[in-house]
Image (spheres, rainbow, N blue to C red):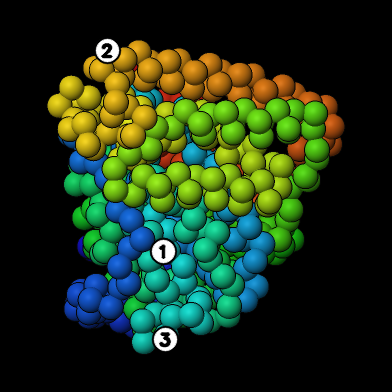
């Protein structure tokens, strides 16, 4: 049997005619995959760095149903992405911090024709978290056909999955309709999933009283993934706290420490401000979650912020042409540049530490105001963090209790 992860339960689920159809669909799926590659819209962005063999990496592809009933899911994704990022920021392997890449697809949308699967790639794998945020806030809900098998096939075929076997590679697909819609079956993607070491985690979106969907469960089990049931319409309480304005002010101060340069620097700066505004408009909770991520090492702009570029060794200041430097630095001597940059680095680290303190005090305040968590509905952030921490731990990653603010280089 070429599906090594099939359980006894799954074998019972597949009748002989169904199994034969799946076997036939695998070869057809390979041909369809090549056709789909040509049809796929160009990604909004791509990963900006090369993975070294020893660099701990986590790759997450998030596939979201954006049909007519999924407004709640999209809002949860916009808000709770940052919760998952903050959790990943705690991950270490062999003492090294991880790098995170995220890709986003939408499916079940009328904005894309049925001939193209009613789906599209919003952004390819990227470590630019503001690009991911912009992708999520750019989603619009409009009813369409939800082809789970096809969107998974697209994601596994078209994304730039790292070849290393020790990379944690995971697809999270969230939706609330039949998993078996469309001509491209989930089974046709299994050979590539196994070959690339990618697991599929399914998130079924319904009322907590809704029974588990067996097909969504079995799809996850087949690839070694996990199944979750969430209440996608549940809104987390938005409780104002005395610390909210402090976070806003500190964020404004931290944004001033970014030293934008190069082609796209102005756009990156504008997008940073826009995603701050998007999170703040969504809720105080969403803004605070974004701030928790911004003080961690996973939030950076290595291609557009000179401080991040120096820290990640993307540029060497002594070899950088003067005309390529930010205007602020061009008239300075080499010693003056180093002194000025070290001052900005120190300022950013100071702000991050103050933000960490405010976030901690905000959390303590909220715990005193919120009711007990027992019996609370499970939401997207719970599913993402619970599953990814468990699976990454099984692959040799360790998670610290608290995120350490990155020290100045």
Residue appearing at x 30%, y 73% in the figure: 40
Residue appearing at x 68%, y 57% in the figure: 231
**For this rendering, which residue is in front, 33 or 311?**
311
User: Which numbered tag is attached to residue 122?
Assistant: 1
Quote the CA–CA distance across marks 1 and 3: 17 Å
Of tags 2 and 3, the one toward the viewer is 2
| Quarter of the picture holding the N terminus | bottom left
- Name the spot of residue 254 as percent of width and height, x first: 53, 29
Point out the tag, 1 or 3, that comes first from the N-terminus: 3
SS type, badge 3 = helix
Mark 1 nearby-residue class (10 Å; few <14, some 14–19, many ≥20) = many
Q: Is residue 180 above or below residue 197?
A: below
Of tags 1 and 3, the one toward the viewer is 1
Point out the tag, 2 or 3, that comes first from the N-terminus: 3
SS type, badge 1 = strand
Dividing the picture into quadrants, the one containing residue 391 is top left
Residue under numbered circle 2: 335
**Is residue 332 left or right of 240 when viewed as pictured?**
left
Residue under numbered circle 3: 114
- Name the spot of residue 54 as percent of width and height, x first: 21, 29
Mark 2 nearby-residue class (10 Å; few <14, some 14–19, many ≥20) = few
Report whether residue 190 is seen. no
**For this rendering, which residue is in front, 234 or 324?**
324
**Is residue 137 left or right of 164 when viewed as pictured?**
right
């Amino acid at each position: 049997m070429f599906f090594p992860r099939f359980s006894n339960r799954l074998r019972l689920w597949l009748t002989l005619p169904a199994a034969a159809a799946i076997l036939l669909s695998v070869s057809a799926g390979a041909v369809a995959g090549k056709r789909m590659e040509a049809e796929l819209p160009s990604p909004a962005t791509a990963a900006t760095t090369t993975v070294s063999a020893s660099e701990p990496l986590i790759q997450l592809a998030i596939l979201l149903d954006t049909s007519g009933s999924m407004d709640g899911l999209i809002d949860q994704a916009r808000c709770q992405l940052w919760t998952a990022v903050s959790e990943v920021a705690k991950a270490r392997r062999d003492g090294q911090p991880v790098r995170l890449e995220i890709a986003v697809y939408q499916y079940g949308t009328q904005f894309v024709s049925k001939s193209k699967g009613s789906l599209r790639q919003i952004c390819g794998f990227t470590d630019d978290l503001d690009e991911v945020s912009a992708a999520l806030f750019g989603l619009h809900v409009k009813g369409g056909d939800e082809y789970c098998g096809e969107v998974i096939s697209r994601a596994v075929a078209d994304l730039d999955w790292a070849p290393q076997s020790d990379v944690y590679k995971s697809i999270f697909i969230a939706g609330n309709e039949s998993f078996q819609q469309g001509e491209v079956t989930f089974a046709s993607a299994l050979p590539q999933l196994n070959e690339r070491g990618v697991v599929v985690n399914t998130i079924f979106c319904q009322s907590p009283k809704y029974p588990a969907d067996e097909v969504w469960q079995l799809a996850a089990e087949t690839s070694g993934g996990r199944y979750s049931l969430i209440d996608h319409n549940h809104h987390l309480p938005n409780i104002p706290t005395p610390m909210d304005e402090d976070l806003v002010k500190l964020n404004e101060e931290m944004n001033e420490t970014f030293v934008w340069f190069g082609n796209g620097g102005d756009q990156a700066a504008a997008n940073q401000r826009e995603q701050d505004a998007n999170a703040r408009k969504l809720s105080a909770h969403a803004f605070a979650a974004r701030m928790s991520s911004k003080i961690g090492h996973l939030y950076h702009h290595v291609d557009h912020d000179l401080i991040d570029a120096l820290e990640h060794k993307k540029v060497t200041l002594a070899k950088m042409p003067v005309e390529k430097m930010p205007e602020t630095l061009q008239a300075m001597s080499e010693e003056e540049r180093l002194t000025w940059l070290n001052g900005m680095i120190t300022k950013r680290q100071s702000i991050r530490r103050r933000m960490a303190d405010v976030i901690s005090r905000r959390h303590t305040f909220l715990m005193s105001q919120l009711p007990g968590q027992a019996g609370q509905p499970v939401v997207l952030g719970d599913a993402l963090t619970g599953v990814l921490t468990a699976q990454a731990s099984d692959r040799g990653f360790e998670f610290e209790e608290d995120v350490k603010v990155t020290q100045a280089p």
